Amino acid sequence: MITPAFDLTQDPDSLIISIRVPYTRTSEFDLYIDGTEFKFYAKPYFLRLNLPGRIVEDGREKAKFDIDQGLFTIHVPKQTPGENFEGLKMLTSLLVPKGSRSAGPLVEDMSRGSEEVGDGEEFDEEFDWQVEQELYRESSEEELRALQKYGFGNQRCGVFARLQEELSDVIDLKNPEGTSVAERRQHRLEAETAAFSADHYLADLFEDDEIKGILKFKPWWAKLRPSTENEAKYDVSFSSEEKEQLRKFTNRSYLLDKTSRHQAWCSLLDILLAYVYDVRLTEGEHSVESPWTIRKLSGTLCWLETYGSLQEVLVSFGRRVLCYPLHRHFALVSAAIQDATKILQAGKACVLKCLLDVHKVFRENDPAYILNDLYITDYCIWIQRVKSKKVPALAAALEKATLNKSDLNLELKELEEAATMVVEEEAQGSSERTSASQRDSSSSEEWDSDDCTEAVEEGNGGGGKASKDSPPQPHSTSSIVPIPHKSSSLLFSEESRNTDAPSSAQEEERTQLIQELGERVAEELRISPEPSSAAAAGGGTSGNHNVGTPLDVNPCRNPLVIVQTEEEVESKEGDSTS
């Protein structure tokens, strides 16, 4: 806690307490009045006074705040009107907590006390839990001149010297009072490089469904209608809350040199870029993360940075968008630049409305309200007094400016090329694996089809078309007996012509022999079916090698072998007789 600078005066009926609390939230402060004790709290300031007289809280107390000087003036009624409070100028004694005016013993026996006090025992004296306070000392002009400048127009210094507890929650710069402008930029670039995540960037680059939805959103400045007034191009209206906030601002004049004015315009653009990014990201409804997002994306608010050109602003904003927020895509950087251009083209009224929205976001956040006192409040007052042609001129310069990925010095092109090669290799490997699996499945289907065909051919007894792998096997020569080319009747007729005319007895015997031979042939020979029917039964074609001749020879002995000539019969009979 910080003990603020204070002063006490009195009149016959009341005690007047003046407390200087710059850079505090005036909407939230607490007062405690109880007899001779007075307490005041407005984060980060705390004041406790032990008064020489009694005061009361009966509804007559009143307070006012001077925002320019950061001064609270509180009137508290005296319990006894007309009473004179002595020692109001003894500020150090007024800070002493109640009950601490009596001095304790100068020498204390610590060994004796340690023996008497054991675990679980209480001290004889009541422990004083009051917060220690030190009288605030204003810095001299020489000390202030030695400190680094920051804030609107680089006109502030020494602010964070008294706000050490809030420092880390507001800005990323560790020692703003002793860090030069060049050192701030160097520290900022190093922090951005360390915070950049290639995996996060590539994930948003290749999985950009949410990014596309954010880019399709149309913010309120994209819906502005042309105005009939000559002063502005678009009709910008303010809500009752915004008008009330404008009435609370104190009219100030700012004496800025040329360099400070140029830096003020650059910082204004930096703040606008961070604001439009948050509006697009939240679709026009600020969230609890909005104070963090706006100040984090703005180098002006987060690092107390000062810029010398528009290109420096764009590069800083682009780097911070790709390093810190949830969605890190270069298309969001381009969209924010276009949004800021439209706002500037709409005139200073549109810029003022954006600044009032930022002021409200920071006003409702505990640590970020300090940035209102350093930057936003001054910008809200200053933008109303600038010439109207300055804002469109900045818009024209921003519209001509270009920002490429190579300008950010984050090696984005190399990352994207490497990631694209990896994706293509994975896609190619996946397609090769798919085609290989398809070939394996088709070959297995062909093998299954061939196996089925062979099984069918074997089941049909060799019918059908002959397979190249299994040509038809020839019949065994032992089961085949050659059939004479001439019929038996012709054979007998030729034999009869070579012999003499037979007798009648021989003729009967020959006829009987022929009949017996015919019967035996009929019994021994099998008539095969026609080739067409055989082909139909076997599932083959007429040119099949397995189709038999009209007379299939039975494996049994051929009866035609017994046919003998008459001379052979006689010679056999003679041999048997002899």
Image (spheres, helix red, strand yellow):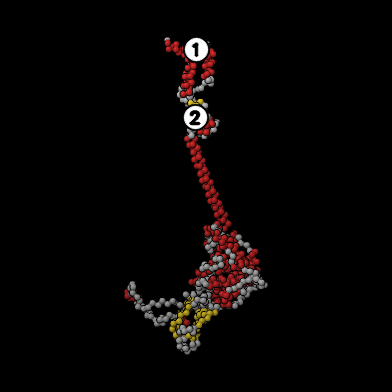
Residue lying at 60% horizontally and 77% vertically, measured from the top left:
252
Tell me the residue at 51%/25% (across/down): 551
Mark with earlier residue (2, 1): 2
Left or right? Give the position of 342 relative to 296.
Answer: right
Name the element at disc 1: helix
How far apart are the alpha carbons under marks 2 and 1?
A: 52 Å
Closer to us: 442 or 253: 442
Res. 111 in view? no
- Of 177 and 43, the residue lying toward us: 43
Percent x, y of residue 294:
55, 67
* Residue type marked 2: Gln
Circle 2: is it few (<14), some (14-19), or many (20+) Cα within 10 Å?
Answer: few
Q: Which mark is residue 473?
A: 2
Q: Quadrant location of the C terminus?
A: top left
Residue under numbered circle 1: 504
Between residue 572 and residue 471, name the one nearer to us.
Answer: 572
